[in-house]
Image (cartoon, rainbow, N blue to C red):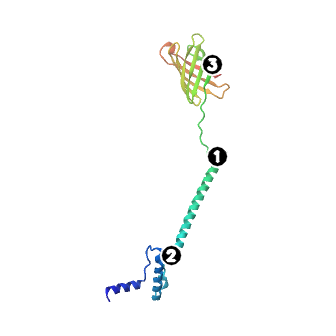
């Protein structure tokens, strides 16, 4: 027996091999060969001839597509449910139901307006008037200081407010060139609102060397 006949015999004994990645029109010939081989090899147990038919493959693919659709539908429904829960929680918090309360920044005390009162220093006392402007925490305006004996001194005001505490500077523009530092506390709940604190004149010379206290009310 030559080599060619031996190879043919081996191929017949092993049976026809299923085509790989074959198009659908190839399967008809494959199943015909399989039937002929089964008839000629009746002694081979049927369990060894288990081949997956094309219809079963299609069913498995359909099952996989169905499972993917189920997973996709479940994910979409879960997303919608989560969105509804978030909207419900937000509505409940807006309605005043128990929930997380965010810390709120306290409002800035407003001091813009006219303040009048008196001051008492180591060397003199008199009346003090302020006309203040305010932009957020920044304070501006003018002041007028009139001692019980002497001339009125005027100037500009600059400073800031933090909570109810004022830090101001009076820049005297008439008379002596003095700068006065002011530390004050405002009571916006009083009727009328009040302002009280201390002052300190800083420049050298007897005319700018003074300190004392003051009390004002808002008009």
Name the quadrant of the C terminus.
Answer: top right
Residue 180 point in image, percent of width and height:
53, 19
Residue contact at pointers 2 and 3, CB within 8 angstroms: no
Name the quadrant of the N terminus.
Answer: bottom left
Residue labelled with disc 2? 54
Q: Nearer the viewer, residue 172 or 6?
A: 6
Residue found farthest to the front: 25
Q: What is the number of callouts on the image?
A: 3
**Residue at the location (59% across, 26% down)?**
185
Taking the image as shown, residue 111 lies to the left or right of residue 28, namely: right
Q: Nearer the viewer, residue 148 or 94?
A: 94
Q: Residues within 10 Å of mark 3 (few under 14, many from 20)?
A: some
Name the mark nearer the viewer: 1 or 2: 2
Compute the Cα span from label 1 to label 2: 59 Å
Compared with 67, 42 (above or below) is below
First in sequence: mark 2 or mark 3? 2
Compared with 81, 179 (above or below) is above
First in sequence: mark 3 or mark 1? 1
Residue 197 point in image, percent of width and height:
58, 23
Compared with 168, 54 (above or below) is below
Residue labelled with disc 3? 117
Q: Secondary structure at mark 1?
A: helix
**Residue at the location (52% across, 70% down)?**
61
Residue 46 point in image, percent of width and height:
49, 84
Q: Nearer the viewer, residue 48 or 170?
A: 48
Can I make out residue 179 in this image?
yes
First in sequence: mark 1 or mark 2? 2
Q: Residues within 10 Å of mark 1 (few under 14, many from 20)?
A: few
């Amino acid at each position: 027996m030559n080599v060619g006949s031996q190879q043919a015999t081996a191929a017949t004994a092993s049976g026809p091999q299923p085509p790989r990645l074959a198009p659908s029109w190839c399967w008809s010939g494959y199943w015909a060969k399989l039937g002929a081989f089964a008839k000629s090899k009746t002694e081979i147990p049927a369990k060894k001839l288990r081949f997956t038919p094309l219809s079963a493959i299609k069913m498995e693919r359909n099952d996989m597509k169905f499972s993917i659709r189920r997973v996709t539908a479940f994910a979409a429904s879960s997303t919608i449910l989560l969105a509804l829960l978030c909207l419900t929680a937000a509505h409940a918090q807006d309605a005043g139901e128990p929930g997380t309360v965010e810390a709120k920044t306290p409002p800035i005390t407003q001091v813009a307006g006219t303040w009048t009162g008196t001051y008492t220093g180591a060397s003199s006392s008199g009346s003090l008037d302020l006309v203040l402007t305010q932009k957020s925490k920044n304070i501006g305006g003018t002041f007028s200081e009139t001692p019980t004996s002497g001339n009125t001194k005027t100037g500009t005001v600059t400073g800031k407010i933090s909570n109810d505490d004022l830090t101001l500077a009076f820049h005297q523009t008439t008379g002596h060139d003095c700068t006065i530092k002011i530390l004050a506390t405002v009571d916006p709940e009083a009727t009328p609102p009040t302002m009280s604190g201390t002052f300190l004149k800083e420049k050298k010379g007897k005319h700018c060397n003074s300190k004392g206290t003051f009390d004002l009310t808002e008009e």
